[in-house]
Image: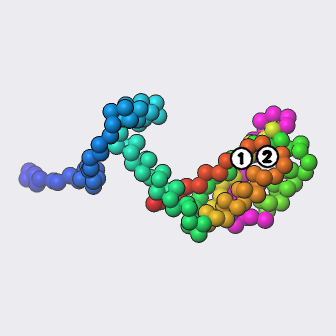
Amino acid sequence: MLRLPVKRVTMTEKIARFGVSIEPDLIKKFDKQIKKEGYANRSEAIRDLIRKNLIIEKNKNPKEEAIGTLTMIYDHHVGNLTDRLLDLQHDHTKEILVTTHVHIDHHNCLEVIVLKGKTGDIQKLADKIKALKGIKHGELVITKSSL
């Protein structure tokens, strides 16, 4: 049987390598942090930091398409908060993909809203919702599916 040599393409051939000079105290802190977060190596941690920075920069453009989540905790007994939340959500069916509602206890609910659209529109909607009386905490996370 004739065997022909096969050149295998590995991931390392598709990755650019570069050097970084870092103070000993800073790399020690970085290594401690990435170990705590479960990274196998510095390279993957640095790639994640770069991706995060690129996403943050892109999201500064209010016309950039994005996807995100608004997570909030609220007391559904406050005024007509539930009705106001539903009205806002029905007014923004273009941006809202799905909502998840969890009853935490007799008074408190956790709700996660998955949003898609222009960064500026997503931010405005999240700000409106977070400003409603009865919302105890709300946090918007905007990300991208690709860089």
Residue 62: x, y in percent? 60, 66
* Picture residue at 80% right of the left edge, 60% below the top: 88
Evaluate whether residue 48 shows in this view.
yes
Chain part drawn in magenta? 91-107
Mark 1, other Cα within 10 Å: few <14 / some 14–19 / many ≥20: some
**For residue 132: magenta?**
no
Q: Marks 1 and 2: CB-CB under 8 Å?
A: yes
Dot 2: few (<14), some (14–19), or many (≥20) neighbours within 10 Å? many
Q: Which residue is mark 2?
A: 135
Q: Residue at x 46, y 57 (%)?
A: 54
Q: Which kind of residue does numbered mark 2 sit on?
A: Ile
Q: Amino acid at mark 1?
A: Gly
Q: Is residue 59 left or right of residue 84?
A: left
- Please identify the quadrant where the C terminus is shown: bottom left
For the rendered model, the colour scheme is rainbow
User: Relative to residue 131, is residue 71 drawn left or right?
Assistant: left
Tell me, yes or no, if residue 38 can be seen here: no
Name the residue nearer the viewer: 9 or 94: 94
Rendered location of residue 135, percent (x, y): 79, 46
Check if residue 104 falls in the magenta segment.
yes
Which of the two residues, 14 or 60, is positioned nearer the viewer here? Answer: 60
For this view, does 74 lie left or right of residue 66? right
The one of 131 and 97 positioned closer to us in this rendering: 131
SS under mark 1:
strand
Q: CA distance from mark 1 to mark 2?
A: 7 Å
- Residue 135 drawn above or below residue 85: above
Marking on residue 138: 1
The image quarter containing residue 127 is bottom right
Q: Position of residue 58 (x, y in %)?
A: 51, 62
